[in-house]
């Protein structure tokens, strides 16, 4: 379905139906964000295993690491 048609269909729904759609969208977005965070976590763990991560508590060294 084309986006503009979907928007038009939603516009004609009752208030309770619109609220249900909003609730579902919120849940879907939360699930997607969790999946994204999990993926980044797994990537970080892999970088740690390969030894690609460097840790430092020295602010000057951290600045150097961020600058690249």
Image (tube, rainbow, N blue to C red):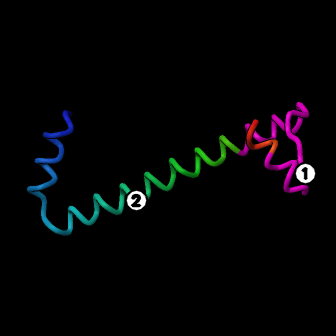
Question: What SS does tag 2 mark?
Answer: helix
User: What percent of the width, then of the height, locates residue 27?
Assistant: 44, 58
Residue 46 on the magenta segment: yes
Say which quarter of the image contains residue 43.
top right
Tally the marks: 2
| Closer to viewer: mark 1 or mark 2 | 1
- Specify whether residue 47 is painted magenta: yes
**Residue range highlighted in magenta:** 41-63
Judged from the image, the secondary structure of the residue bearing numbered disc 1 is loop
Please determine whether, in this image, residue 34 is positioned above or below residue 23. above
What residue did someone put label 2 on?
26
**Residue 47 x %, y %:** 82, 35
In the depicted structure, whether residue 20 falls above or below residue 49: below
Say which quadrant the C terminus sits in. Answer: top right
Residue at figure coordinates x 20%, y 33% from the top left: 1
Tell which of 2 and 56 is nearer to you. Answer: 56
Residue 50 location in percent, x, y?
88, 31
Q: Residues within 10 Å of mark 2 (few under 14, many from 20)?
A: few
Q: Nearer the viewer, residue 4 or 65?
A: 65
Residue 23 placement (x, y as % from top left): 35, 63
Within 10 angstroms of label 1, few (less than 14), some, or many (20 or more) residues? few
Q: Please tell me the numbered disc located at residue 56.
A: 1
């Amino acid at each position: 379905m084309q986006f503009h048609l979907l928007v038009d269909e939603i516009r004609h729904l009752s208030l309770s139906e619109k609220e249900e759609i909003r609730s579902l969208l919120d849940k879907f977005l939360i699930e997607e964000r969790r999946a994204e965070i999990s993926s980044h976590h797994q990537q970080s763990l892999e970088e740690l295993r390969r030894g690609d991560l460097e840790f430092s508590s020295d602010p000057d060294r951290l600045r150097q690491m961020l600058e690249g």
